Image (tube, rainbow, N blue to C red):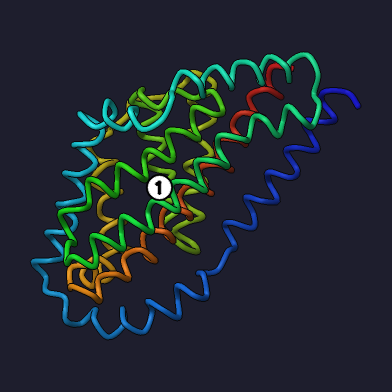
Amino acid sequence: MNKNRQFDKQMKRIKKEEENLLKKKENSFYKAAIGPVADKMERFIPGKLKAALETAFYKGFRLVFEKGNFYIEKTYDKDKIQLEYDLNNYALGKRTERKYMKRLDRYSMQSQRINSSISVIEGGVLGALGIGLPDIPLFLSLVLKSVYEIALSYGYNYETQEEKAYILLLIRTAMTKQEKQKEFNQKLEELGACIDSGIVSEIDLEESIKTTSSIFSEALLTAKFIQGIPVVGAVGGIVNYNIIRKISRFAGVKYKKRYYMKEQSWN
């Protein structure tokens, strides 16, 4: 099978997976476990807490982006992931065999599994201790760790301003639903294509952080409020798992799609 035909088949699989993610309904267990409690608790959440949570996410993103990468990168072997990508990318350039495509996905899939599992422990322990807002930088570090590993596994450098903006938009897309998600997804497609073509216009990273923080805080508002209550807060493990799994799966599909689209354009 020639290279273009093999890449076309792979793109069809990716687009199908992407379509399924965009249509995916909320996890039934998560909805059953959290939904009823969230609905009852929401009206008791004070306005000051809403503002505090949004500020906490904003400061958390700023902290991780400005100072956190050094510590996040200590939790995985960046050079090894990049070397693995270089080897598999070179092999795919010579022979488009299925085994090399699977190897290219290996670190992405591994990251999704491991970081989702860690999130259960992190959210459960901190929640059981009654810790809510203070754990946000740690939670965001785990979110970004997962996305960073996925980006590296497909040959993308997450340290540029453009790629940071892409990651923030990716998170917004994964965290929203229906029409808003479709709107963000279209913008994400356009931004990814522009970055890969080298035609990106000026990036307003500050505004992107603010918007992402607002969406994150809205999505996690009740969950984090519950997580701040001892014992009941142990439910945070379920919440964190669901969030990180959703974002990392979305990141896996999007970065994989960008890789193959870029390869197709070069052939």
Q: Check disc 1 and report the residue beneath it.
A: 171
Q: Position of residue 264 (x, y in %)?
A: 71, 24
Using the image as rendered, state which of residue 8 and residue 88 is in the foreground.
88
Residue under the point 35% across and 24% down: 159
Using the image as rendered, state which of residue 130 and residue 245 is in the foreground.
130
Q: Please determine whether, in this image, residue 35 is positioned above or below residue 170.
A: below
Residue under the point 72% across and 38% down: 11
Crowd band around label 1 with a 10 angstrom C-alpha radius: few (<14), some (14–19), many (20+):
many
Quarter holding residue 266: top right
In the figure, is residue 123 to the left or right of 50?
right
Using the image as rendered, state which of residue 88 and residue 8 is in the foreground.
88
Instruction: Find the residue positioned furthest to the left.
Output: 48
Residue under the point 44% across and 61% down: 242
Quarter of the image with the N terminus is: top right
Q: Position of residue 218 (x, y in %)?
A: 28, 63
What's the residue type where badge 1 is placed? Ile
In the figure, is residue 18 to the left or right of 64?
right
Residue under the point 49% across and 25% down: 156
Quarter holding residue 30: bottom left
Q: Please determine whether, in this image, residue 221 is positioned above or below residue 22.
A: below
Q: Position of residue 155 (x, y in %)?
A: 54, 23
In the figure, is residue 152 to the left or right of 57?
right
Quarter holding residue 259: top right
Q: Secondary structure at mark 1?
A: helix
Q: Please determine whether, in this image, residue 143 is positioned above or below residue 175.
A: above
Quarter of the image with the C terminus is: top right
In the figure, is residue 54 to the left or right of 14?
left
